[in-house]
Every structure is written in structure tokens, then in C-alpha cells.
Image (cartoon, rainbow, N blue to C red):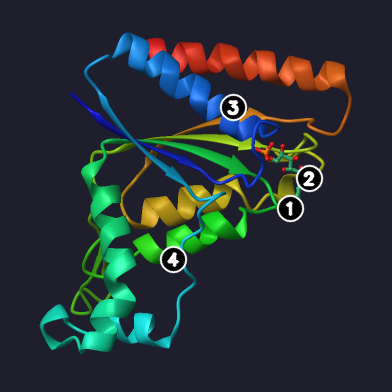
């Protein structure tokens, strides 16, 4: 039995392309893997707090030396990390905002990339001091964009700080098995959008059955 962490980060409701596609993904997954467990986190509607000075002090102080203020400041992050580590599979809905990820998702990343929890720091290994701690996981990221042409060498390829960033930051903590599904052309025309949605559905069906 696997444990899925399903995360949405669009602030839109029913109009959200990414939200609809992650829902379809997880519904199909549950049909083929009925024993798997799903935890849902909605960053679009319930963003996590931004980091502040007590948070930073707590994150870089050994837990046994935490003051009550530090304990309070790091509590949400600890809960988010526990939830993240409990999952085997991540299904993430991710709009492109200004060529990158929405602030709600960036805020989440800042809460879960934690020294000693999701990545270790070993300064004595001068060449390679960061050791990823989140191993053996699988991630599916369903992006939504209003245009297309964000692949390497394509017209907006050099402006794409969305999927390359996801690969970098989750690779840093150890998640290297990452598959993307893109829903594009949200604002182009209805035919291009329909084609993109159909292609995304085909890919989702293949991923779920694989
Ligand atoms: C603030 C903002 C910034 C956006 N920036 C981009 C962008 O840089 N590139 C792009 O292709 N689409 C951009 N979009 C369009 C969204 O990515 C697109 O509408 C997508 O479908 C949103 O995801 P959702 O449908 O799940 O809400 C932007 C939308 C908003 C609201």
C-alpha cells in the first residue's frame, strides 16, 4: 500500500486546470490502487506561513536548544515535513506564475526543505556537503500555463523557471523520479486548449496504468 500526498497550489476553484487534472489523476489512481491512502493539502486556498526570523533561528538550532519561541515558530514546518515524509508518491498541481511557481508553492518549499530533516549538511565532506534524505519517492507534477513553447530550445524555453526549478529543488532533497504533465494554452484558443487537455489526459491514463 502506498501513501499519496496530493497537493494543489492554484488559488482558482473550478476554473483551475491544474486542480482538475490532479483530481482526475488521483481518482484514476484510486480506481487502480484502491488500497492506497491519500492525504490532501490545498496550498491555493490555505497557504502556509512565510518564514520569519524566529523560524530561521529555529531551523538552524538543534531542537534540544530551542526556546519556546523557536518551538512555536517551527511547529507548522515540522508538521509539514512529517506529512511530506510520510508519503511515497506526490501528485502536485502547479500553475505557472511569471515563468515560475506560485508563491503559495514556493512558501511550501521553504517550509519543507529543512536541514537535518529533508537534507543533511556534512561540512567535512567539502566536495559534496549536502546529503539528500528523501529517497525512494515518486513525484508527478501537473503544470498549467496560458501559452506553450516552454521546452528546451523553444520560444520561451529560456524563461521557464518552473519545471527546471522543481527538478533542482526536489533533486536537492533526493527526489529524482519526477514526471511532468503539462496543460497549456489556457488563454490561447479553445481548440489548442482542448488538444492540450486531451494530451494531458492520455498521459495521465498511461502513468496511472504503468
Ligand atoms: C499572476 C499570474 C501569472 C501568470 N504567469 C504566467 C506565465 O508566466 N506564463 C504562462 O504561460 N502563464 C501564466 N499565467 C497563466 C496561468 O499559468 C494559467 O492561467 C494556468 O491555467 C493557471 O493554473 P490554474 O488553471 O490551475 O489556476 C499566469 C497567471 C497568473 C494569474
Tell me: residue 84, above or below residue 40. below
Nearer to us: label 3 or label 2? 3
The residue identified by callout 2 is: 156
User: What residue lies at 55% left-to-right and 46% top-to-bottom?
Assistant: 9
Tell me: residue 191, above or below residue 83. above
- Quadrant of residue 103 within the rendered picture: bottom right
The residue identified by callout 1 is: 159
**Any atom of ligand 1 within 8 Å of the CB at mark 1?**
yes
Nearer to us: label 4 or label 1? 4
User: What residue lies at 72% left-to-right and 20% top-to-bottom?
Assistant: 196
**Any atom of ligand 1 within 8 Å of the CB at mark 3?**
yes
Is disc 3 in contact with disc 1, using a CB cutoff of under 8 Å?
no
Is disc 4 in contact with disc 2, using a CB cutoff of under 8 Å?
no
Find the distance from the CA under tag 4 to the CA under tag 1: 22 Å
Find the distance from the CA under tag 4 to the CA under tag 3: 25 Å
Give left or right: position of 65 versus 200: left
Which quadrant contains ligand 1? Answer: top right
Which tag, 4 or 2, sits closer to the chain's start?
A: 4
Find the distance from the CA under tag 4 to the CA under tag 2: 26 Å
Q: Secondary structure at mark 2?
A: loop
The residue identified by callout 4 is: 110
Q: Secondary structure at mark 1?
A: helix
User: In x, y percent, where is residue 205?
Assistant: 49, 11
The residue identified by callout 3 is: 20
Nearer to us: label 4 or label 3? 3
Nearer to us: label 4 or label 2? 4
Amino acid at each position: 500500500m502506498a501513501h499519496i500526498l496530493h497537493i494543489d497550489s492554484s488559488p482558482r476553484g473550478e476554473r483551475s486546470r491544474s486542480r482538475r487534472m490532479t483530481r482526475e489523476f488521483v481518482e484514476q489512481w484510486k480506481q487502480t490502487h484502491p488500497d492506497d491512502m491519500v492525504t490532501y493539502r490545498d496550498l491555493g486556498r490555505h497557504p502556509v506561513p512565510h518564514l520569519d526570523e524566529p523560524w530561521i533561528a529555529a531551523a538552524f538550532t538543534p531542537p534540544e536548544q530551542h526556546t519556546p519561541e523557536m518551538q512555536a515558530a517551527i511547529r507548522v514546518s515540522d508538521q509539514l515535513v512529517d506529512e511530506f515524509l510520510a508519503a511515497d508518491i506526490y501528485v502536485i498541481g502547479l500553475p505557472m506564475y511569471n515563468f515560475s511557481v506560485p508563491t503559495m508553492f514556493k512558501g511550501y518549499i521553504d517550509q519543507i526543505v529543512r536541514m537535518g530533516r529533508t537534507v543533511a549538511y556534512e561540512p567535512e565532506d567539502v566536495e559534496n556537503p549536502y546529503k539528500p534524505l528523501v529517497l525512494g519517492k515518486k513525484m508527478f507534477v501537473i503544470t498549467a500555463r496560458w501559452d506553450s513553447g516552454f521546452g528546451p530550445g523553444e520560444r520561451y524555453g529560456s524563461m521557464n523557471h518552473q519545471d527546471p526549478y522543481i527538478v533542482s529543488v526536489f533533486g536537492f532533497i533526493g527526489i529524482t523520479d519526477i514526471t511532468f504533465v503539462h496543460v497549456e494554452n489556457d488563454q490561447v484558443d479553445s481548440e489548442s486548449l482542448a488538444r492540450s487537455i486531451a494530451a494531458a489526459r492520455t498521459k495521465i491514463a498511461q502513468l496511472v496504468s504503468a
